[in-house]
Amino acid sequence: MSSNSSSRIICFSTFEVNLQTGELRQQGQKVKLQEKPFQVLAALLERPGEVVTREELRSKLWPADTFVDFDHGLNATIRRLRDALGDSAEAPIFVETLARRGYRFIAPVDGCHVPGGIAVAAASARKKSSFSHTRLGIAFLSALVIVALPWGLRRYSWRRADVIERKLTASSFENSVTSAAISPDRRYLAYADSAGIFLKVIRTGEVHSVSLPPDFAARVDDWFPDGSHLLVSRAEKPGKASLWRISVLGGSPWKLADDASGGSLSADGTHIAFRRGALTYDGLWGREEWVMRSDGTDQVKVAADKSDESQVGRPTWSPDGNRIAYIRSNWAWNARTSSVEMSEWQKPSSVTLFSDSRLSPALHWLPDDRLIYAFGSAQQQQDASLWVVSLRQSKNISSAPKRISGGHGWISHVSGSPDGKGVIFIRGNWLPSVYIAPLAADGTRVLASKRLTLDENENIPSSWTRDSKAVLFTSDRNGIREIFKQAIDQPVPESLMTNAEHLSQPRVTPDGSEILYISTPRPADPEAPSSIFAIPVDGGPPRLVLKDVGIWNVQCARMPSTICLYSTAKGKTSQTFRFDVRSGKTADPPQSDPKCNWSLSPDGSQRAIVVFGANNGRIHLRSTSTGEMHDLTVKGWGGLMGLDWSADGRSLLVSWHNFERDSALLNVSLDGNVSLLLKSTNPEIWGAIPSPDGRWLAVAEAGGPKNVWQVENF
């Protein structure tokens, strides 16, 4: 290197700056840095340890006749420089801020900055005298390497076997991460939560918000290869979403596709694979897989739903860009079967790689032809593990699966950088719990609330005892779902029933003396009959009431009515039967409805029905005797989910989701008037059951922290 060329290269820490070519490198790897941040770095390196004023930087960056918001522009430029260096304004290593004055480069500048020809001359002068010492040193070092190499290789192999896992975000219960993606250069984590979309510098932990228009709530799907744009999914209305391209530097978002979510960019950035149709409220599933160009044109359907019960997860691309892979799940009334499916997107063909009911929608295809996927635990639904398997030329499995991570918390998403060295996943505990809340006398206001179930298990309420003193709920705290009763003034519940089968829907009989519940065989078999049993309200041996295939709901009215109903899943429909609680005999014919949630009025005269999917705020009220039906429309509240009758039968308690993050509990009178009882971002409100005296609500809320983790060295 000549003295002239070497004087244009400055080194500090692990960085090397070439002032002649305008390049910044770290340990030989080029670091992307825009022109103006590089100009600032060069100005600071010209006078290391000295203050460079803001006015000096202004004259270097913007000509005198340029009209610009100087303060905002310089602040953004300094921020991008710090991001490139992995520096922090709060604890600077390289660039120090002096308030209202300017900036100073504070790290030692040394190494490859060789002024004039001094170093070259010195080296020449030393060359002859050091020749014999050099030969002796080489011999000594050779012997040392021969001795140390085997030990070093063994130590290196041992260290390489350790999988490294670390937490990248620490969001709270109230503000959990919904989605995330790692940048192409592995320097940034883009993630979304209820407050917006953010960029986190992984090395320093510094976080910047991404500027977005008002009311633009979205999930982060992927990065574009340029490292300055994100692919995001925006929920626009219940069941529908759209794909957008946004800049991390701000500006107007650009819509790419309607009715689309869960996008994934091919390695070369030319195409996007995405889901379409029947978006679920958790944002994890769709009905079809599509591919389009990265500008939103030439949209092609790749894989459609194979049945009304089929859903597909977010797609991931093969390294060569010719295939996509995704999780397909088929839902039955009491079971789910899942498989990893692979499709050639330019041909109408697909293959199933393997199937397992424990698969979550998380899937990612690595550049070396390995697939990462997640398993839920068969014993504890909130536990999950991450696995990797190798493929043979992107067509079939060529090695045994390897477990790379495991622990408490369900894994809902996994993705990585284009080089495969940065892999992230989202882990969280999304637990339903029972809360109790007193109601105002008119039933239109919740006065307060407290958590009744004080444990980290899935607790789902379904009824009260007739004296309004205790809540009946199911819980998986012992590995299988059991029935519990807990008084509202007690800290722990009482177990009423447990066995090897899955128990659900505990409901009291009309006279309040017994509890009915559904027992489903384990392992789940859609063709095996379920049973309705009854036990004394204070516990005791069960008695069989009836058996049928596909039982999913059972409810009874209150005395003086003796009406009890149960429903079965029959393909696309639900059939509801009236039965005698003592003999188990049913009355024909049943009432047939679309797939829905329903609740029986306290007097047994009618059912309130909410159809699954985009119901546009419509509730069906259907007579239990004649089958006649009329509609009740809840204006402005599309996305109704679950419902129950108020204690006096004059209104309905309805849960609502907007398919982004918000949920609410509504009191809807039978003439359509709405009172907002509760609204929440996290936890989600699933539903509420009133006590028979009308004074209390047992509210089912599901929530918990979800955060981003990084895994390496697997």
Image: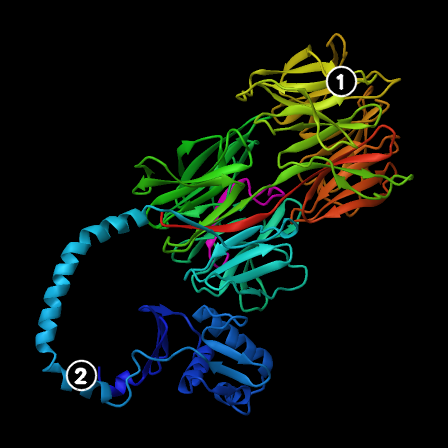
The tally of labels here is: 2
Answer whether residue 260 is visible to the viewer in this image. no
**Residue at the (46%, 81%) spot, across then down:** 40
Where residue 211 sits, quadrant-wise, is bottom right
Question: Dominant secondary structure of the magenta stretch?
Answer: loop
- Return the x and y of residue 523 as percentages of the image width and height: 52, 21
Residue 280 on the magenta span:
yes
Which of 97/381 is in front?
97
Q: Who comes first in sequence, dot 2 or dot 1?
A: 2
- Return the x and y of residue 164 as percentages of the image width and height: 40, 49
Amino acid type, callout 1: Asp
- Label for residue 538? 1
Q: Specify start and end residues of the magenta stretch as a single range.
A: 277-297
Residue 680 on the magenta span:
no
Q: Indicate the secondary structure of the residue bearing disc 2.
A: helix
- Return the x and y of residue 659 as percentages of the image width and height: 65, 46
Which of 658/254 is in front?
658
- Label for residue 123? 2
